[in-house]
Amino acid sequence: PACREGGMATGERCEIGMKIDRKCKRMEEVMEKRFAELKALVAEIHDLKAALALLEWDQQVYLPAGAENGRAAQIETLSGVIHAKSTAAKLGKLIETLEPADYPEDSTERALLTRLRRDFAKKNKVPAKLVSQLARTTAEAHAAWVRARQAADYTLFAPHLARIVELKRRYAELFAPSASIYDPLLDDYEPGMTAAELDRIFEPLRREQAGLVRQLADRPADDAFLHWKFNGASQLAFSREVVKKLGYDFRRGRLDLTVHPFTTSFGLSDVRITTAVHAELPVSCLLSTVHECGHALYEQGIDPALDRTPLAEGASYAFHESQSRLWENQVARSLPFWRFFYPAFQKRFPKQLGEVPLERFYRAVNRVVPSEIRTEADEATYNLHIMLRYELELGLLEGRIPASELAGHWNAKMQEYLGVTPRNDTVGVLQDIHWSLGDFGYFPTYALGNLIGAEIWNAACRTVPGLEEELARGNFRVLLEFLRRRVHCHGAKYEPPVLLEKITGRRSIDSEQFLTYLKGKYSAL
Ligand code: ZN
């Protein structure tokens, strides 16, 4: 029988057994119903993930020491529920029957379906056995990493890392063929990015940045005043004042103290940040807070219509980092920023800074010091820390570097790129948590974030008249409004290259604009 409403049969059959075509009213109703069902399932998963994130936030911020085991059990249970719901056959069937191409090209529906298809297909390629092996192996490896750090002895961690690398190789092979074993891992953080593309981007960056650092590292220091004691409560109060002025919405978020600063979100109506205070590093608290504020401004600016879907997040890890880096570096390490904020900062610390003029303070804040630790690195050295990690993890995965020999390779590359040899493994190869958690392919997104941040900053300078003068007057709104309109509101609706093209006019990332920014900044210092 031909469909009553549509007339023209296409050979498909609708739910009541009629042949239908695209214009069939009955089919449209069915699709609408299915789409609503899908959205409800997706929203349920989203809410459960938000509850899990809240448990984890609480674990970092408030949890009493004796509550650790109970919390671990709660997190495991909830994670299991989320995994079951995200891989359920019912969800898969809905995703399969709703065709993205049936929705208008630029529509949210199409973007959502494309994204759900991609995530579901990826998840379903991974056997449950490998998932649980990875979970168990990384839990043990993380504990071993903590012990190895305490003992400053990489050899305690090496056998665990070898097992993780083996499992990650097996994971990547599920997505064969890929040009590089690294590509499927990278794709988990930066959709569509490849090792070949990274090599193209990183090659000139490595060369030029290492050269720049060699030039800058010899400049004499004039920053003794930054190493006196600065009251922690005053630092925190100042950081709070700054992020409020930058546009962070405290009605939909809060700022707390943790050992390692981070941003987390429980849906678009609650995006929280944390920071850390060090009495002898007075700008570190401010820069960390502004960094996390940059992540949070991104999430607070996403179109509320996307809430409770997987599109209610940043376009990618690199895009997220571009926002935190832009506010941290192009804004909070800039002269216009300090023209506005320095008098207030000086007033809080008259003993330490009362006699220090703005220009001297600004030069001290931007001093280039090649150091062992990535998270303390300045703008000139930061990417070198990242490229070193990328090369080493690629070597591990390709089998060129045995896990047992990683520390030696680490120290050699640190010397080559930064002229620094770590004092011990804790401040060397063991400094980052990522590998102990199995996060391979994550590090490059930090450097890509710096590059994208510089490109977006240039786009803002071209679009907003007198941007730097506005910032020096304390008008941070103009920048936030540009980012809201061009970056934030879209959430994850567009693939990263598409979004980049919408903002900057160019699809591919390159290091040129970042390097021009960096050279310009340091030649003026
Ligand atoms: Zn970040």
Image (cartoon, rainbow, N blue to C red):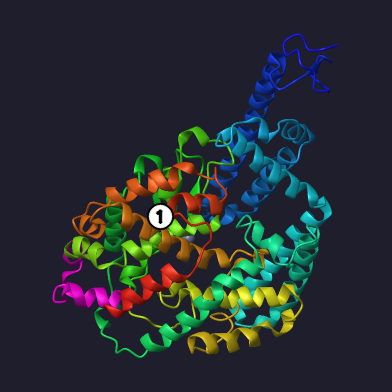
Mark 1 nearby-residue class (10 Å; few <14, some 14–19, many ≥20)? many
**Residue 355 lies in the magenta-colored region:** yes
Q: Is residue 381 found inside the magenta-colored segment of the image?
A: no
Q: Nearer the viewer, residue 254 or 183?
A: 183
Residue at horizontal 48 percent and vertical 42 percent from the top: 490
Kind of residue indicated by mark 1: Gly
- Where does the magenta region start and end? 344-366
Q: Which residue is mark 1?
A: 294
* 152 displayed left or right of 217: right
User: How far from the left and from the top, in percent, is residue 251?
Assistant: 36, 39
Give the quarter of the image for residue 146. Answer: bottom right
Seen in the picture, residue 167 relative to 31 is either above or below; the reply is: below
Would residue 356 be found to the left or right of residue 231 on screen? left
Closest to the observer, 103 or 56: 103
Is residue 127 shown left or right of residue 353? Answer: right
Residue 20 x %, y %: 77, 18
* Badge 1 residue CB within 8 Å of ligand 1: yes
Write the residue at 26% across / 83% down: 224
